[in-house]
Image (tube, rainbow, N blue to C red):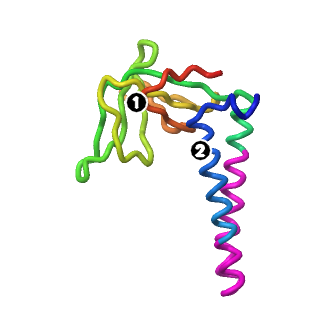
Amino acid sequence: MERTQIPMPLQTQILIRLALAVCSLIAGNVCLVFFTVTIAVPFFLLALLTAVSGCHLYRVVVRGRYLVLTGAVLNVERTAVLRRPKAILMEVEGKALRVVLRSRHKAPSEGSQISFYVQDSTPIYEWRGIHLLGSYLAAAAGTSGTPT
C-alpha cells in the first residue's frame, strides 16, 4: 500500500504519535544535558513507546488489517458534570453499536455520519443488549469511510 492510500484520519494518528516521539526525544536530550540521567530516562521511554506505537499503527494500516465502521449517530451520551461527550450510540448495518469516545471535545451531532477505523482483531462486546466497541484507531466525522 502506498502512503497516499492511507486514509487521512489514520495518517493523522501516525504523525501525531511519531511527532510525540520526536518531541520526547528532544526533551530527553535537553534533560540529559542540563540535569541527570534519571530525569531524562522517562522522556526516552516515552519516545520509545510512542515510536513503537506509531510504527505498529503504520504496519497495521499498510497490511490492510483495519476495518471502517460507518454509521449514523443515534444518541450522544454526556458526562454528568462538564457535559462532555462520553459515548455515542450509532447504527451500523442495522445494528446498534455503542462506542466509548476518547479525547473528544466536540460531540458529533445526532443524525450525522461518523466513521471509526478499528483493527480487524478488535473485539466487539455485548453490553445491555447492544454491541460495545471499546477501542478504535481513529475517528472521522462526516465521511463515507470507504477504504481504498
Residue 95, how many percent across, how many down? 42, 16
Main SS of the magenta part reads: helix
Who is closer to the viewer here, 107 or 46? 107
Q: Residue at x 40, y 45 (%)?
A: 104
Magenta stretch, residue numbers: 27-55
**Label 2, label 1: how many angstroms apart (C-alpha)?**
22 Å
| In this rendering, position of residue 119 left or right of residue 132 | right
Residue 8, how many percent across, how many down? 58, 35
Nearest to N terminus: mark 2 or mark 1: 2
Q: Residue at x 36, y 33 (%)?
A: 88
Amino acid under disc 1: Arg
Who is closer to the viewer here, 139 or 142? 142
Residue 23's quadrant in the figure?
A: bottom right
Who is closer to the viewer here, 109 or 87? 109
Q: Residues within 10 Å of mark 1 (few under 14, many from 20)?
A: many
Residue 114's quadrant in the figure?
A: top left
Q: Residue at x 71, y 75 (%)?
A: 29
**Secondary structure of the residue carrying numbered label 2:** helix
Q: Which mark is residue 32?
A: none
| In this rendering, position of residue 71 left or right of residue 146 | left
Residue at image mark 1: 98
Visible residue check, residue 129: no
Q: Which mark is residue 13?
A: 2
Magenta segment includes 78: no
Mark in front: 2 vs 1? 2
Magenta segment includes 28: yes
